[in-house]
Image: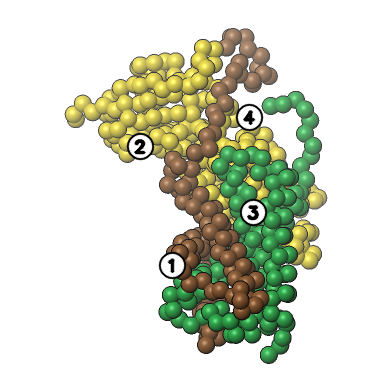
Amino acid sequence: MSAEADSTAHVATRVYKPAMGAGWWTRKRHYFLYMVREFTALPMAAWLLWFLIEIQRSGSVRTFRPGTSTAFVIFSFICLLFALYHSITFLSLAGVIIHAKVLDRPVPPRAIVLTMFGLWFVASIVIGAVLIGFGR
Amino acid sequence: MADKRITIRAARFDPEKDKAPHLQSYDIPFSDDSMVVLDALNYIKAHVDGSLSYRWSCRMGICGSCGMTVNGTPKLTCSAFLRDYWPRPVTVAPLTNFPVVRDLVVDMEDFMQKLKSVKPWIIRKREMPLGAGEHRQTMDQIDDFRQFSQCINCMLCYAACPVYGLDNKFLGPAAIALARRYNLDSRDQGTKIRLPVLAQADGVWECSFVGECSVVCPKGVDPAKAIQQTKLDTTLRFTLPYGNRE
Amino acid sequence: MTEKTELAPKVALGHLFWWFMFANGGGLAALVLPVHILVQGVLGPLGIVPVVDRHYDTWISILGNPIVKLYLLVLIALPFFHFAHRLRYLLVDLGVPAAKRAPAQVLFYGGAVVVTLVAVWVLLTTAPISLG
């Protein structure tokens, strides 16, 4: 750099622009867990598509086929793990995003997260009861 | 005290000679347990290699000048203790996601532009006359935005953000947190004016809530929270009836 | 920095809308999907509990209920807007900047719309609507 460099020119003679590789998420645990969280969408979508197909196949007795194979149970179990991870991360982060005031006092994030998990619990009980209760 | 030593591997880049940065090792005395990475850099510059270039100022975690990548993590070098790394070598590189000007110095221009773009000042629809006195504010009103006002513009959050790393057009954590600081300030009436910058395509919507920005923030600003809350507030503004008004 | 003057930023209503759908779909999926997968995908097939979709007669009579149809439509379709948004950005994170552009948006969000339409069709054509 010349000693009489123009004071208005902030541009360096040459800068090095680092390239960000596509493997950035493999280098830190927090980044990796983030990618897992994002990935949960895929197994969940797959399971819901199976469900849609199962409904479609209920059109007639001939085509109706509830899942029974071990492969299906394993598939569902894996999807369940991802769905649980999605629920835990999504509902926990709801406490960050939702900011509410009750009587002019901000609601603590912990209260919001507990409410979310409470809703999850209640919804699961109710839906589970319906799914099982009508299954005579 | 025993003759303890530590190896600092500092990134060197001479724009007139080098194509890319390379690491240069320095073996220096680790004479005091309270030594931080910045102390090591200062020792190198003073006693070993005067050509090493880096930014620093207050050396106490308030000016935001000394942000660098230390062993892969964005850190204020004045707050990164050597004892936490010793006896392993400490690799000091320039802050990621920014163009490197020389050695450990990065080009901050994009960051400065982004800060400016959110109009980080009190915006009034009509200024109060001086005779009306100061704007009054309760402690609760200050608490509404206090956390987001703690930003020291150190850029660690931009270095940690993979979205910014993949696309420099992203508005970024600090700028959005700063905008929220003003939007939440009871004296401010500029939320609608800041809206196009925050809610543009490269604004809050690009954030996928990795959350690493809040992890590395040395001041607990929690920019990730600021961004998500801005997404929600902006959406409610447009989906609720009578939402889009001051 | 480039010399060209940049257009003034404006509110990206499209992004806002898809994020809104993403948030709603994700919330619904978070609250409701795990129990469906657990009961219908694991416990039912293993015979641990009776489940409504294991026997044809029970299942068909339930499917005829319009409220059930509506619930199933929302259950299946809404999360797909969450999946579409998330998977598009997953591609961006994996270093595919093309995933940000309009054709990718049409592909992913259009895909969610297609799933919605297919779900509507399936629910309307499977098991005629009957109250009771």
Amino acid type at circle 2 is Phe
Work out how far the residue at label 4 is from the one at label 2, CA to CA, in angstroms.
29 Å
For mark 2, does the 10 Å Cα neighbourhood hold few (<14), some (14 to 19), or many (20 or more) residues?
some
Marks 1 and 2 share the same chain: no
Q: Colour of chain A?
A: brown
Residue B102 vertical placement versus B98 (above, below): above
* B9 shown above or below B75: above
Q: Which residue is mark 1?
A: A70
- Is there a contact, CB below 8 Å, between mark 4 and mark 3? no
Evaluate whether label 3 is on the same chain as label 1: no
Q: Residue at x 52, y 61 (%)?
A: A86
Query: Which chain letter matches label 4?
Result: B
Whole-angstrom CA distance, mark 4 to mark 1, is 58 Å
Q: Amino acid at mark 1?
A: Thr
**Subunit of label 2:** B
**Which of pointers 1 and 2 indicates the residue nearer the eye?**
1
Residue C4 vertical placement versus B120 (above, below): above
Which amino acid, by three-letter code, is at mark 4? Glu
Kindly identify which residue carries mark 2. B81
Q: Residue at x 63, y 63 (%)?
A: C79
